[in-house]
Every structure is written in structure tokens, then in C-alpha cells.
Image (tube, helix red, strand yellow):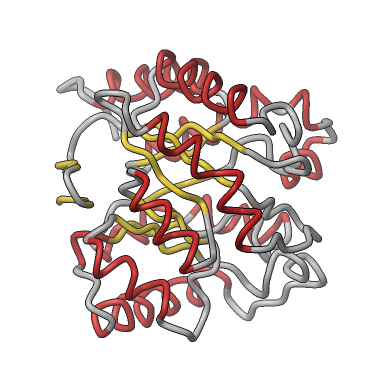
Amino acid sequence: MIWEGRHHRWVFPRPALLMGVVNVTPDSFFDGGRHFDSASAIAHGEALAAEGAEILDVGGESTRPGARPVGEEEERRRVLPVIEALAQRRGVAVSVDTRKPGVARAALAAGAVIVNDVAANREDPALWQVVAEAGAAYVCMHMQGSPETMQSEPVYRDVVAEVHDFFAERLQRLAAAGVRSGQVALDVGIGFGKTVDHNSALLAALESFRSFQRPLVLGVSRKSFIGKLLGVEVQDRLPASVACAAWAVAHGVEVIRTHDVAATRQAVRLIEALRARPDAGC
């Protein structure tokens, strides 16, 4: 299985890719404001790469529950200098975390190779056309609603089946927009329009999404469902975040999006070493 975008190409099976989070925002749920200026964000991205991140996911608009949208000009102002600088680092691919076609186009021109799209539930194909024209890699994430509304009583008949149906329909829509299957990875969208039970059901069913024969991306790092399930605050969620990442890799997930690259890398590499043994039971 291949995932490719522009001059980057990843061939699976291979060790899980670690996608380090670079939030250039004042209001993201975990690290909002820590790296809001360009110099700090660039230094943070460099540090994540040194810890083992092969992808740096740069975002200029918080998508935490209830977050208010950011204007396109402001989002570009936040992310473009960071993308331009980090794209110069050898051995690292830069991803832009955006919902806006204009921001995606500018970010790709600045050196990004992946568009990480939390709003793949849209009907307007404009962003997909940007991805197709640039030949970029694309993360198609499931979300019910929008960041502003997604946690207002999300309801599903069968969350696993509905996310399956969403991916099947989106892959058809993406192909119609000119995005090749090899450009696409899938993300079930933990915490995006889901209750604790919905998130738990999706984590338990990760292997079922391998039927699409596309790489799976998972972002669970420090998320609120961990706090609700275990009664811990965001600063104390590292152990459970690492446990979720290890579980995901053990069940076939290829890309882990994380704030904590070094700790996550240790855990997933250990799981991979155990799975590679000829006497492994999984």
C-alpha cells in the first residue's frame, strides 16, 4: 500500500509514521498560545522532528469543540512562515491542518505536501480540487457537524457502520474530483462529533477500516474523551494517550498524530518489535 503526495512517497508495511502537532494558535485545547509566534512554532517543529516525527502538522485554526473560525488571511499569516521554514528540513514532510481551499493552496505553494482536512464532510469540492491539482497527499477525516457544534449531543445509530459508509462515499467523491486513491489516508476523527462511547467503539473497531486498503491516521493525543473516561486533566493524559497510540499500531494504524513524539515513538516501536517476532500472537 502506498501513500503519496508531491515528492513524498510512503510504502506500507513500514514502521508507523509519527505526525507531530505544531499549533500556531492562541486557543488550541492543549498547547494553545505556547507556540503562537512563528519563531517558537518553528523551533517546536524542529524539536518534534529531532524526537522522531516524520510529518509535522502545522495548524493555524483551533478545531477544539466550540472553537470559533479564523479568517483566511489570519490563518495564512500564522502558518505560512512556519511551513516555509520547516519544509526546508530534510527527511520531514510538512502537513497543513486546514479547512480552507485558499489556505491549502498557499500552504502547498510554501512547501507543504499533505492537507489534513477535518472538514472532509463538506459538499463543496473546492479543497479537493486544490489537492488534485497539486498532487498532494490528503487526510480524509470523519466529523459530525463542525468544530463549533460537533459536541452538541452527537447521535449515531451505529457509529462504526456510519463512519464506514462515510469513507466509502468520500472516496468516490474524491475520485470524481481528481484525487487519486494513493493520495488518500483515512482518519475516524476521534473526538470530532462523538461521545466517549462512540470514540471507544471506533478504537475497538480500528481493524475493520483496513478493508479500504488506505493508510489509517489516528489522533488521540491528550483528547477530552480520555479525561472523561479516566477523570484526568489534559496535562495528565500522556500515559493514556500513549496507550491509545500503542493500541492503534497493534491494530494496524499507519500514522499517529501526537503532541508527544518521543514518548509515543518509544511505545509504538516496542509494539512493532513485538509484532515482528515469528512467535507473536497478533
Q: Nearer the viewer, residue 184 or 72?
A: 72
| Residue 32, image quadrant | top right
- Where's residue 115, x and y in %? 40, 55
Q: Nearer the viewer, residue 74 or 186?
A: 74
- In the rendered structure, the answer to whether residue 164 lies left or right of residue 2 reads right
Q: Above or below — where is 166 with respect to 194? A: below
- Where's residue 51, x and y in %? 44, 14
- Where's residue 274, x and y in %? 30, 20
Q: Nearer the viewer, residue 227 or 143?
A: 143
Number of numbered tags placed on the structure image: 0
> What residue sits 73% from the left and 47% below the top?
225
> What residue sits 71% from the left and 76% below the top?
155
- In the rendered structure, the answer to whether residue 115 lies left or right of residue 227 reads left
Q: Above or below — where is 151 with respect to 8? A: below
- In the rendered structure, the answer to whether residue 205 lies left or right of residue 276 reads right
Q: Nearer the viewer, residue 268 or 131?
A: 131
| Residue 199, image quadrant | bottom right
Q: Quadrant of the C terminus?
A: top left
Q: Above or below — where is 43 with respect to 93? A: above
- Where's residue 109, x and y in %? 33, 52
Q: Above or below — where is 142 with respect to 114? A: below
> What residue sits 56% from the left and 34% below the top?
22
> What residue sits 53% from the left and 33% below the top?
258
